[in-house]
Amino acid sequence: MSLAAESPSPSSPSSSSDFAALLDAELELTSTADSVSVGDPSASAASNDEECGYEEEEEDDVVVAAGEEDTLSCIKRRRVENQHQDRGTAMRPDDDAIGSSKDVQIEVCPPHPGFFGGLCFRCGKRQDEEDVPGVAFGYIHKGLRLGASEIDRIRGADLKNLLRERKLVLILDLDHTLINSTKLFDLSNAEIELGIQSAASKDVPDRNLFTLDTMQMLTKLRPFVRNFLIEASNMFEMYIYTMGDKAYAIEIAKLLDPDNVYFGSKVISNSDCTQQHQKGLDVVLGAESVAVILDDTEYVWQKHKENLILMERYHYFASSCRQFGFGVRSLSESMQDERENDGALATILDVLRRLHRIFFDSVIKRVRQEVLEGCKLVFTRVFPLHHRPQDQMLWKMAEQLGAVCCTDVDSTVTHVIALDLGTEKARWAVKNNKFLVHPRWIEAANFRWHRQQEDDFPVAPPREKSKENSASTKEKGKENVADAASTKKKGKETAASAKENGKENAADAARAKERSKENADDDAGAKEKGKENADDDAGAGAKEKGKENAADAASKKERSKENADDAANTKKAKKIADNGVNANKIGTSDAAASGATGS
Ligand SMILES: [Mg+2]
Ligand SMILES: [Zn+2]
């Protein structure tokens, strides 16, 4: 059963799918900018996984050759990426220097981001003896070394993808956590008499006792482990991390994951550790901030105790009991076992479910609160009379998005929300250079997890536009000229005019352009809300409309640029996007989770 995936959103399906589409568009751009090399080493690792994992040391040459090929394709792909990014940044008129400089830095070597088969996978330069950077990721691919900044970058991109899938990272120990193994020569007389060895070699369905022939060992899977892996894989990206050696780890991974759906190359063994007798998250490409460790041994996780959930040890075989000083009969000897439904793994699965739910609940709440942070709103004639505004949906929505809502205007108010211009508070907003927006501005922020540009949500004049327009705007001319100046400050923001209008007017736009030359020329002016009014001294309503349309046409273009911009500006986009998608799913998933925990 999947907790997160296949659940339709319980409320407002259309808006959630709009949101999902928007999110996908943003993520598409973000991930192309981000995952330049994330995909590369791990993708090559995935395809070469078989050879890599099971290969003997002698075959080094072959691997290096394969590595070089990968390096080339990696560099090629990287170039394509950079072209893509260049186009993206070149399109933008007023470039955000911070966002783009990050992308440009990707090109520079040294420092080398990492080495593959002894060659830098960016510039192809051979690795110097004294210049051994970062950490070896031999379990992903032999000969892969990554520098610190590259690791950070990969972790960042990986985190984004994970959270988007509503997943965290789970590191699983093997011995005494998921399984118990014994050497054949360590079997007790009782075990031998009970015929445990022949039981292990019987190929029956759903068996949990296995012989590892090449290693002269028996392995017993802990009860519930198969269900545990199915369920946990819906909430976590999973790694095996054992102090056993590589061959053993791979054999056990095959038992636990015969179809290779859970772990892939993510099987870490003692040869991957960077410190003796210690396990470290330094060799895990998942972000530490979202990593949960399940292990029966606390000692090996000195540096990551906060991430550790200590497991009750699973002793099945007699040798295991002896090793830990228990003089009792082992489970195997007494032909017993932990129970499936309330044994250690079932219990810990519940803990993981709670942890997963709480993590995403709190993250989503926090991210939602950031959307309209710093906005102080006053509503004017938006709500029905004689109703408490605090009870209104829009008011509550704005508060959930982090805005402060109040009933009276003062200098700290930033936005007045109105349906038309004809109220005192609306006029106050215009006069005091406050944002005056349509209530849809709040709804849009709610759907898009992003504060929307205020100019995209203008408030209509009180009566029919075409007749009243020139007279009324003429009167307001002076105010609006001043307003125009202030709007100019908002620069780029103002460039994009209403997306909604943009859709309707897309077809009109070309016609409108022809009709009014000013609009074509007026590129700076077209950005400004106040402009239309200033121009209207000369103007008819039709002209104004044409101008709006032309601006809309331009704005569509600008909008896509801005999206690219946002995408490059990963931090912000990432947060919103990642968590947004999760929010989309949270309702049902919680229901499932709480149902499962019986709360
Ligand atoms: Mg262990
Ligand atoms: Zn390099």
Image (tube, grey):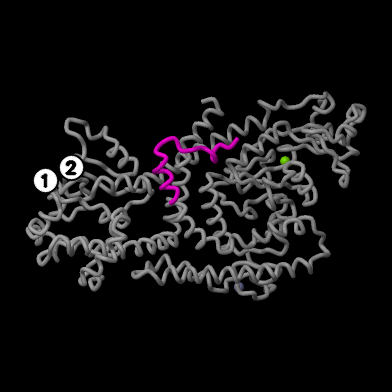
Q: Nearer the viewer, residue 12 or 574?
A: 12
- Structural crowding at the residue carrying mark 1, measured as other residues with C-alpha within 10 Å and reported as few (<14), some (14–19) or many (≥20): few
Q: Position of residue 266 (x, y in %)?
A: 68, 51
The quarter holding residue 537 reads bottom left
User: For residue 511: magenta?
Assistant: no
* Mark number, residue 380: 2
Q: Quadrant of the N terminus?
A: top right
Examine the rendered structure and indicate whether residue 244 appears above or below residue 547: above
Q: CA distance from mark 2 to mark 1?
A: 8 Å
Q: Residue at x 28, y 39 (%)?
A: 394
Residue 482 visible in the shown view: no
Q: Position of residue 194 (x, y in %)?
A: 90, 27
Helix, strand or loop at disc 2? strand
Q: Are marks 2 and 1 in contact (CB under 8 Å)?
A: yes
Ligand 1 is in which quadrant of the figure? top right
Q: Residue at x 63, y 30 (%)?
A: 347
Q: Position of residue 569 (x, y in %)?
A: 43, 61
- The magenta-colored residue range is 1-21
The quarter holding residue 583 reads top left
User: For residue 3: magenta?
Assistant: yes
Examine the rendered structure and indicate whether residue 439 appears above or below residue 130: above
- Determine whether, in the image, residue 541 is placed left or right of residue 231: left
Look at mark 1 in the image and give the residue it sits on.
424
Examine the rendered structure and indicate whether residue 383 appears above or below residue 542: above
